Image: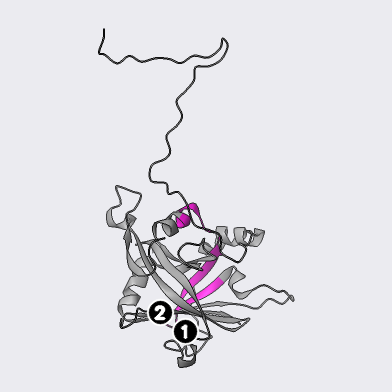
Amino acid sequence: MMGEPQSKTITGPPGTSPARPSTPPTPGRQQISLVQPSQKKQHRTKVLRLFRNVFRSFPIITPACKMGNLPLGIPDGHRSTSGTRVTGTLFGYRKGRVSLSMQENPRCLPTIVIELAMQTNVLQKEMSSGMVRIALECEKRLEKGKTRLLEEVLWTMYCNGKKTGYGLKREATDEDLNVMELLRPVSMGAGVLPGNSEVDGLDSELAYIRAHFERVVGSRDSETLYMLSPEGNTGPELSIFFVRI
């Protein structure tokens, strides 16, 4: 009967299977347009894969932070003069671990991603106090190697002098890249991204804090990231210390 849609089967030569329509792309998947940073991305090592599988089972102990008294903010001699400005993003689900991503700028792929030993909602509470100092420590290796400080895999993490557990450097996942792509237009700010679950409610939302950081290299065994606030903004202070002892 005319006017009624009819289904048709497309057939090929004898002996072949009927043609099938192509599968539509998965909804919600971001097209990644981030570019490579100037430094070559390091390949994943067997050691990194091993630590990625087992680090969550490490015991939690609470010794004193070996770094002693940490500076409270950017030293006067380092303000936008002796450091390199990078883009840093802290992100994670509310009841999940927070991750730190460092980029040369928001348009580049991450140069490093570290999964920190702290839940996102706990970090948000610490940030509300106005000052957060995160120390990431690793031990020097006995063998004579040329491993750069930020290429170390496993870190002992302290937040405001209290040990919180172990952080792990890892390769950026597809989800990490999707987050960086969504935040590509954002140079600095804080907020939440919608989650990928319709049943978890607020727990499925992904919170983030993005800012410019001053990266100051003290030696081959110490680097510091100082969060830079917009001019005239007296927001929370955040400093991240990387130390090899």
Q: Is residue 125 above or below residue 219?
A: above
User: Relative to residue 15, is residue 79 drawn left or right?
Assistant: left
Q: Is the C terminus in the top left, top right, bottom left or bottom right quadrant?
A: bottom right
Residue 152 in sight from this viewpoint:
no
Residue under label 2: 228
Quarter of the image holding residue 168? bottom right
Q: Does the segment drawn in magenta span residue 193?
A: no
Determine the residue positioned at 41% across, 82% down.
160
Furthest residue to the right?
144
Mark 2 or 1, nearer chain start: 1
Q: Is residue 173 magenta?
A: yes
Which of the image's four quarters has the N terminus? Answer: top left
Q: Secondary structure at mark 1?
A: loop
Please state the extent of the stretch shown in magenta in the rendering: 155-177
Dominant SS type (magenta): strand
Q: Position of residue 129 (x, y in %)?
A: 31, 80
